[in-house]
Image (cartoon, coloured by chain):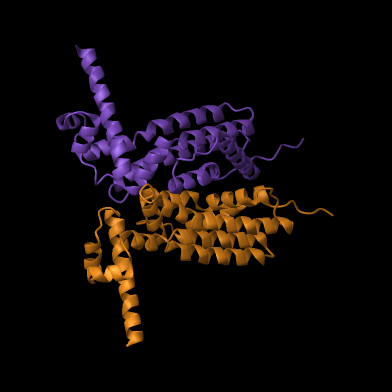
Chain colours: A orange, B purple
Amino acid sequence: MEPRDGTQSALKHKAIIDAATALFLSKGYQDTSVEEIAARAVVGKQTVYKHFADKQQLFSEIILGNIATAEGFTAAAAGILRGTDDLERDLREVARRYLVAVMQPSVLQLRRLIIAEADRFPGLARTYYERIPGHTVTTLGSCFRDLAERGLLQTDEPALAASHFAWLVLGQPLNQAMFCGYADPFSTSELDHLADAAVRVFLAAYAAPDPRP
Amino acid sequence: MEPRDGTQSALKHKAIIDAATALFLSKGYQDTSVEEIAARAVVGKQTVYKHFADKQQLFSEIILGNIATAEGFTAAAAGILRGTDDLERDLREVARRYLVAVMQPSVLQLRRLIIAEADRFPGLARTYYERIPGHTVTTLGSCFRDLAERGLLQTDEPALAASHFAWLVLGQPLNQAMFCGYADPFSTSELDHLADAAVRVFLAAYAAPDPRP
């Protein structure tokens, strides 16, 4: 019976996460009860408590669900940049992937939710900040330091260069989504245009000058 | 008696706005009642309704209070850029003022509040977006178009250039404040450094090349 129990347990875990995510997003954390989460997930209240110590731990697990998405992008970006032999092409690829990762409705929703609840959960909001945008920019900064050592970029402040890259790429569509929602998403060609324009600006400032013979 | 009544009425109006702002920020819109607002402002509930049709209209007036700050910055920036005879110096001045305007705790708090309530008030959030960040970037774009016509900048997409300028300047500190709060604010020298670095990147990409004889 173990495997079947294990599968059922995993299915219930996911049903609870999905139900709680939907309720936190529509009603906010404070106004959502464990009873409502259990009812929407079609499980008993005790089952919720078997999986999660309390409502706050459930919220935490949901919010930090964006970490997997962020780490997937960050690992891919580092791999692309470490092996680059065409920096402009590869930065465009990284910028496009960055937009795809961040502009997913599920990522945007959790981002908005944690900003909304940051006063109530300052520790969780700081963890989110450090492990998602913070970790991404730190990794990009480390890649840019390596690229400067290879003579492909020039910067004394690779962390600041990484922050400039991130905000050139993400700023406008991410800000728009925070206020105006995700019902009318950007098209792939709009996002590609933003990615390419961001890379053009970034390289104008940070590309190492061509070595002259 | 008219002037004294007018003054008292204005004082009550402000007391209601201040009380409601504090409550919306600490408890959220939904969990704040008009009774609590009246109690905190030390006025009767009927006085609240004499000044504001309902809780939503009060919320609206508070949120749109950032418009005055935004318009003050935008007008100053346009004045500086239209008369510039030293673009680098004047862009640095605009970038510093932009950070000062946006990084005020009261502005950051309302920004976080409208993001938190954007699902509940999509029309208000869109109005905020259009009249505050949207209007600022549109005005900067119009200034950059003029500067391109004067031969000081080069860009086919002044609106995109304005968005790049805005996010180079604001991205990192604004994002950090959304997640980590405003208890530990940036120092003036940190903000000045961010402003100057943003202008350096912006001009590397958008400054018109020096005319050669």
Quarter of the image where the N terminus of chain B is located: top left
Q: Is residue B123 above or below residue A56?
A: above
- Relative depth, front residue between B195 and B134: B195
Against A13, residue B95 (above or below) is above
Q: Residue at x 28, y 65 (%)?
A: A19
Residue B13 x/y as whole percent:
25, 27
The picture places residue B97, in percent across and down from the top left corner, at: 52, 32
Is residue B163 among what the camera can see?
no
Q: Nearer the viewer, residue B47 or A48?
A: A48
Q: Going 28% across and 56% down the picture, which residue do you hit?
A: A26
Can residue B66 be seen here? The reply is yes
- In the displayed structure, B83 sits above or below A164; it is above
The x, y position of residue B94, in whole percent, is 55, 33
B74 displayed left or right of A50: right
Q: How many marks?
A: 0
Q: Left or right: B156 with respect to B22?
A: right
Q: Residue furthest bottom?
A: A1
The answer to which of A210 and B154 lies nearer the viewer is: A210
Q: The C terminus of chain B lies in which quarter of the figure?
A: top right
